[in-house]
Amino acid sequence: GRGRGSGRLFHSRGEGSTNRGGERHRRGARGGDSRDQDDPGPLPPSGTPTADTERIRLQVNDQHFDCNLPNARFFVIKSYSEDDVHKAIKHGCWSSTTLGNKRLDAAWNASQGDVARPIFLLFSVNSSQQVCGAAKMTGPVDHNTTLNFWTQDKWTGKFNVEWVFVKDVPNKALRHLTLSNNDNKPVTNSRDTQEVLAETGCEVLRIIRDFQHTTSILDDFAFYDARQQQLLDHKPAHRRGPQQSFGRGTGSFGGRGSPNGVGKADDAKTDGESLVGKNQQQQGAAEDPVGEPVGAGNSQVGGVGG
């Protein structure tokens, strides 16, 4: 495979490598030996196509996407695990930490004025040293819904997103951008749900749009599909909860109409250079200085709790 997580730009929401089985769980198919000892068997290799990947590839990474968005707001999302980013892309939603959900929900509510202000989320997986995509929030946080497919059961609430870009962009392509609202630290050194000011956020989107990538998490969707089923099968029945159903039209892709996508937000804090991703504490911790933990459970940049 392509060795996911080989570039380490941003942190995810988990606070340490002990959560989610450490590096193997965080980096998944791209981290080498990604299976736990109790995994029932081999998983599909990197590059195995699925119906989802073919559909998604046709709806993201628009080379003509307009990155001139002066009214937009941007937040870093950190995740401990690529498993959760896979689910965020597949189902078009995200769950953050309690703090992250409140922060993003407040931003959403404030954006619904006479002049709509789109909210973009910049995703990164802890210790991956790269951004893995960008999405756009498409609705407020539903604090009363809990999804049962995250790698950890601690994440509550959920909000819908549409994915605009799904590609691996190394931190070195973004590190020169600094945040005046975060002690002039590089955007890649942010915690989960750290806000990125509009001018810098637009430049981040432009760099992601123009970056000629060779890898993305879509390459390993078959791997994560199989592992998602394994994880669900190994959960005690009382912890599985009701299965949420997502039609193609309600997820990130299915015709929501907006080329600007957003994923889950985390609260995780981490020390690294990953821009956006799920926080494993809340599905996202910051690995790189890109944002403050806003997502599920991590103390650094992060996203959905894993």
Image (spheres, rainbow, N blue to C red):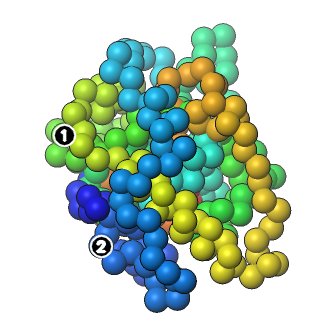
Query: Which badge, 2 or 1, comes first in the chain's sequence?
Result: 2
Where residue 91 sits: x, y (%)? 62, 46
Describe residue 26's horizontal placement relative to residue 32 as left or right. Answer: right
Describe residue 55's horizontal placement relative to residue 167 as left or right. Answer: right
272 or 54: nearer the viewer: 54
Return the mark for residue 32.
2
Secondary structure of residue under mark 2: loop
Q: In the rendered image of this protein, does residue 280 appear above or below residue 199?
A: below
Return the mark for residue 173.
1
Q: Please rate how many residues cluster around mark 1, counting C-alpha atoms within 10 Å: few if below 14, some from 14 to 19, many from 20.
A: some
Which residue appears at 68% of the width and 76% of the height?
233
Which residue appears at 67% of the width and 21% of the height?
112
Q: Please rate how many residues cluster around mark 2, counting C-alpha atoms within 10 Å: few if below 14, some from 14 to 19, many from 20.
A: some
| Residue 200 visible in this rendered orientation of the protein | no
Three-letter amino acid code at the position of disc 1: Ala
Which residue extends farthest bottom? 37
Q: CA distance from mark 2 to mark 1?
A: 25 Å
Secondary structure of residue under mark 1: helix
Q: In the rendered image of this protein, does residue 256 appear above or below residue 85?
A: above
| Residue 41 visible in this rendered orientation of the protein | yes
